[in-house]
Image (cartoon, coloured by chain):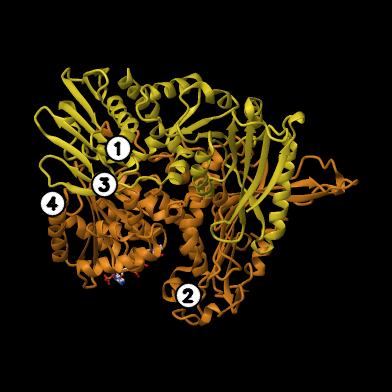
Chain colours: A orange, B yellow
Amino acid sequence: MSGHANPLRQGLVEDRTPEPSTVVIFGASGDLTKRKLVPALFSLFTERLLPPGFAVVGYARKPMTDQEFRAELHEWCSKFARHRPNDEEWTRFAECLSYQAGDYEDPKAYAALKARLATIEAERGIPGNRIFYLSTPPATFPIAVQRLAEGGLTDRRGDERFTRVIIEKPFGTDLDSARALNEHCRCYLREDQIYRIDHYLGKETVQNLMVFRFGNALFEPLWNNRFVDHVQITGAEAIGIEGRGGYFDHAGIVRDMVQNHLFQVLCLTAMEPPVSVSGDDLRDEKVKVLKALRPIPDGRFDEFVVRGQYREGSVAGKPVPSYQTEAGVTAGSATETYIGLKLFIDNWRWAGVPFYLRSGKALPKKVTEVALVFKDTPHRLFGERSASEPNVLAIRIQPDEGISVRFGSKVPGNSLDIHPVNMEFRYGTSFGAEPPEAYERLQLDCLLGDQSLYTRADEVEASWRWISRLHEEWAASASNDVPRYEAGSWGPEEADQLLRRSGHVWRRP
Amino acid sequence: MKTREVVLARDVGVDVGGIERELGALWRDASKRSRHHGQVTRACSWNLVVHCADDATYSAVRPMIDQAVRFVPSRTLLLKPRPNAPVADGKAVEAWVTAACQVATGGGKLLCTEEITIESRGPEGVAHLPGLVRALTVPDVPTALLWAGAPPTSSAALRILLAGVDRLVFDTQALPEGVEGGLAKLAHLGGLLDGLALADLAWLRTASLRSVIASLFDEPIGSAPLDRLKRVRLRSTPRGVPAAKLLVGWLASRLGWGTPERAARGQLGWQLKIGTGSTLRIDIDVDRVTSSRECHLHSVVLETAQGEHFAVTDAGAPALEVSVPGLASRSVLAHEPTAPQALVAALGARGRDRLYPVALHRAVELDR
Ligand SMILES: NC(=O)c1ccc[n+]([C@@H]2O[C@H](COP(=O)([O-])OP(=O)(O)OC[C@H]3O[C@@H](n4cnc5c(N)ncnc54)[C@H](OP(=O)(O)O)[C@@H]3O)[C@@H](O)[C@H]2O)c1
């Protein structure tokens, strides 16, 4: 980082300013670019977190001029950027934006891109540092990585200038495809050039999970099997699949939410304190959690896994059609829109503690949370009057981020009645400042060469190793019967039974 | 917004319980009135003690506080010491409590912060203030003292600071013109209290300017020209002089410059040795200078022995014109914080900027 060579940069709040560089976005005509990627870059720009020599080049097949690209992005940044652009800011930011139309397979198109980059870099004083953000459908990832290298746009040798590639999710659809993609990428790039993105890790409240655990002395001593009875992790969506039937019917909720986002939350909840939060230390600890996940024993699948599919119902007063009738869904599809899992992490800290994880579409509300449910007191001093509800520490990741603790308190009066009460901390009310968007933090980290919030090859493979087992079992199963649940409910009855067998119940978040 | 008056009888001393009771009543009222907003959340991440020496300062600072507490929920203690005012109706100290509520981001909850205004009259009333601060601060959250108006350059603030203040927020730009040694007194005050963080709003206003100056020496130019400097010229309005000195202090501390010596008595010109042993001349020019920037600086020019010029010049806020040898000059955006934004920053991580005490210490050398 240039900042460290320059003595005037040291200690400045903006000393996380990257070196002059270009971000090339593949799939720049797409939704993610317009809604998230460029608005995030614009916010970084207004916060002076981008270097003076900076350029964004949109790349996609759709023919567009620079002017059209800029006009389109102006509209989207006005809608989606945290800072709505004023005219002056936009004019300056727009100077950084260019568009290059081209195919993802054609080597000539890559040669043209290379020539265009050289011109832009010369004009803007950028010494050839490049980030290629692959925001295209996953089928294009392998060819794009290959062509970029063949065309000399990325450079595998340790050079003075950096070339990095951000790869959007999903990274593979099972263990084999993830391995194959990792191997393919390694032919053309070093691991420290590969940035596998999971935008969940860019969320402030997900990072706050680490701060909460390791920045306070209060909680960590309780964070183990001596005190924790079980853990519940919920990633609920209120919406159904809303027009994404074609994609979702192939993916299912496990690939869409669990393998990436919820497993990341699981790792941050269960991992040991890392040596540091930078570089590989954090990722080392996450991988250890994934490796310690107990495989589901043969023949006992139903004791650990419940899938479901929503039928007609209503969510928050709005009718939701049955999954089977959604556009793009194959007739008789057995794709899961709900998953409930009972997991065990076979290590010293968590031996014997069930981790229940659920995720679903068309559930009553959108919420992501982690809840630690504590064991009962060793002795019931207040007998029958003791709180029958266990202590719960709940960490709400979205929306309305915060932490609540449930404990028993004496009901005012002359008798000794105990009632559960909640103590709440809300992120948004303690800090009025708006947190940055996940894509701001992640793109800035990539510009700075910080991979700690990106997923490493072994991490992706370890999570697929566990997850692929589910898909294999379902594929091998003779029955295509997926339990149905009413849209707007908390999932199928079988999911309640999954917990009831161990004397537990799902929280109503 | 709802206000209640609490009368603190002179002979019973400080009725802290009365103030807390009145606040409790305000919360109950707010909860009743907010049924359609759901629950009322009382939020507090700071005790913000504000010292307003006179009514004009109080009126000036009010809007800044009202805005800032929306972002940093605080219990605000507004102190109005009036040592020369007569004690009216036997009341040496009077207090008002107010709750300010807003719908929290994302809707739903009503988020309220609270404010206690304390007016003390006569020397006896003023003497109550440190004790009141001790009694009325919310436990377990840090306390900041915002010294509104001219910053405290004597130990007048000391008694209040000793009441458990963690951070002193002030604005050296409000130092009366022509007061030499103001920075030194501040540094002395900071040095007296171990662990007290100093947050200078004038320093925070220069953050984007410092960042632009630093960017002149990024790659590909690099920092080598900094070893060849011969002259540094700053142009500012008279109000910007403390900020200009702090900027020199920052450069001196980052670049390891030697102790400055005044070129001539009463002039804003100095000479010092830089790392390579050569002599560097520094000037702060205030004649007929205007500036559109809140920090009142117009330009900073760094010149090397080889005649290379690295310049940052006011180009109509928020733009700065930047010029370096060999490249066409260009304009960059360098926003300065508004007053409430500066206060919010002062209560955040930037309010204990580790560069500041060092820069202040080096700036003080310019006043010797
Ligand atoms: N949108 C989200 O919220 C979100 C969230 C997480 C991850 N992602 C991932 O981010 C990537 C981009 O998302 P997106 O929503 O922007 O996708 P998108 O709109 O479907 O696609 C982006 C662009 O890729 C090109 N493209 C589309 N279909 C293609 C095909 N079959 N072959 C080659 N190129 C094709 C198109 O540009 P041209 O035809 O002009 O070349 C399109 O504008 C995807 O990998 C997605 O899985 C998206």
The CA distance from mark 4 to mark 1 is: 27 Å
* Quadrant containing the C terminus of chain B in the rendered view: top left
Q: Which mark is residue A51?
A: 3
Q: Nearer the viewer, residue B177 or B280?
A: B177
Residue, disc 4: A122
Which residue is pictured at 31% across the width and 52% down the height? A45
The CA distance from mark 1 to mark 3 is: 14 Å
The CA distance from mark 3 to mark 2 is: 39 Å
Residue A36 in the image: state x and y as whole percent: 38, 61
Q: Which mark is residue B328?
A: none
* A81 is higher (above) or lower (below) than B276: below
Which dot, 2 or 1, sits closer to the camera?
Answer: 1
Residue, disc 2: A242
Which residue is pictured at 20% across the width and 52% down the height? A154
Which dot, 1 or 3, sits closer to the camera?
Answer: 1
Q: Nearer the viewer, residue A380 or B309?
A: B309
